[in-house]
Amino acid sequence: MTRTPLTKDRVRHHFHYGWWKYVLVSVGILVGLNLFFTMTRYQAPKEARIDLYLCASGADQEALQAYLDKAHQEILPELEEINCLVMMTNDGADPYAVMQLSTFIMAGEGTIYMLSAEDFRNYASQGGMVNLDPYIASGALNTGDIDLQKGTVTHREEEEGPSQTHVYGIPADGMFGLWDFNVDNRGMVFCVTVAGRNDDNAVKLLDYMIKTLTMPMPELVPGS
């Protein structure tokens, strides 16, 4: 059997026409490694972490995380993690924003959400949010002068059962400290998801946010 000798010209010719194969293989390896590490890395159980999801395009996620790290140290040191994720603002014009939010909600992701009033009512009326009435009544969630009407939703626990009206969300209208993170709070509502399985700690963080972020309206609008 005749063997073709390997020369510099043949190697150069091979890589000149076949370079894309090596690029494709390299990309495949990198994607595979990333998927492997993502699937195998340790993730704290839901009971030991809080994930704050905000519909706020353009928000400063790094500054928000620094704020949450401070809250973690001050009020919830027993938790393993407090994280934030900035999502697209769902203004009804971008179908991807709608799909992103519904995907996260249906997958049971997130502990606390900041949603538009419309999205909040939609998911709360379907039983996706925690009833905050007991926490408000006990003083664990101090809502102060917040008008809770926007956070009140009627929900039917069972298809044939009576409907019940409760506070499922905290309007963020007065939490202008969010502007420091380039988050427009106007018309938004904070709520705790049933799927988060960390209600007490989520309410504790929400109470902290009300205390530290409620302030008079600044002159500059986020993004201006």
Image (cartoon, grey):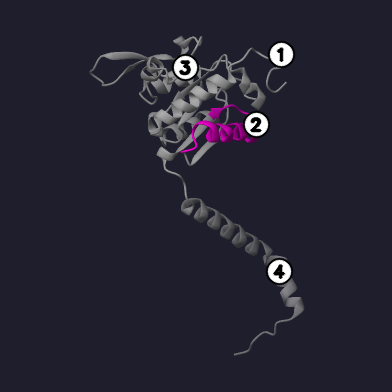
**Could you tell me how far apart the alpha carbons at marks 2 and 1 are, in whole angstroms?**
19 Å
Question: Which residue is identified by label 4?
Answer: 15
For the magenta stretch, what is the residue range? 54-78
At mark 3, the secondary structure is loop
The numbered mark, 2 or 4, whose residue comes first in the sequence reads: 4
Q: Nearer the viewer, mark 4 or mark 1?
A: 1
Give, as a three-letter code, the residue at label 3: Asn
Residue 58 is a magenta residue: yes
Residue depicted at x 51% and y 51%: 38
Q: Which mark is residue 60?
A: 2
Q: Is residue 64 above or below residue 123?
A: below
Answer yes or no: is residue 222 visible. yes
Of the two numbered discs 4 and 1 on the same chain, state the one appearing first in sequence. Answer: 4
Nearer to us of marks 2 and 4 is: 2
Please name the residue that numbered disc 1 is placed on.
Answer: 219
Q: Which residue is mark 3?
A: 142
At label 4, the amino acid type is: Phe
- The residue that appears at 64% across and 36% down in the rendered structure is 62
**Image coordinates for residue 61, horizontal then vertical, percent:** 62, 34
Decide whether the magenta segment is chiefly helix, strand or loop.
Answer: helix
Gap between marks 3 and 2 measured at Cα: 27 Å
Identify the element where label 2 is drawn: loop
The residue carrying pointer 1 sits among few (fewer than 14), some (14 to 19) or many (20 or more) residues within 10 Å by Cα, namely: few
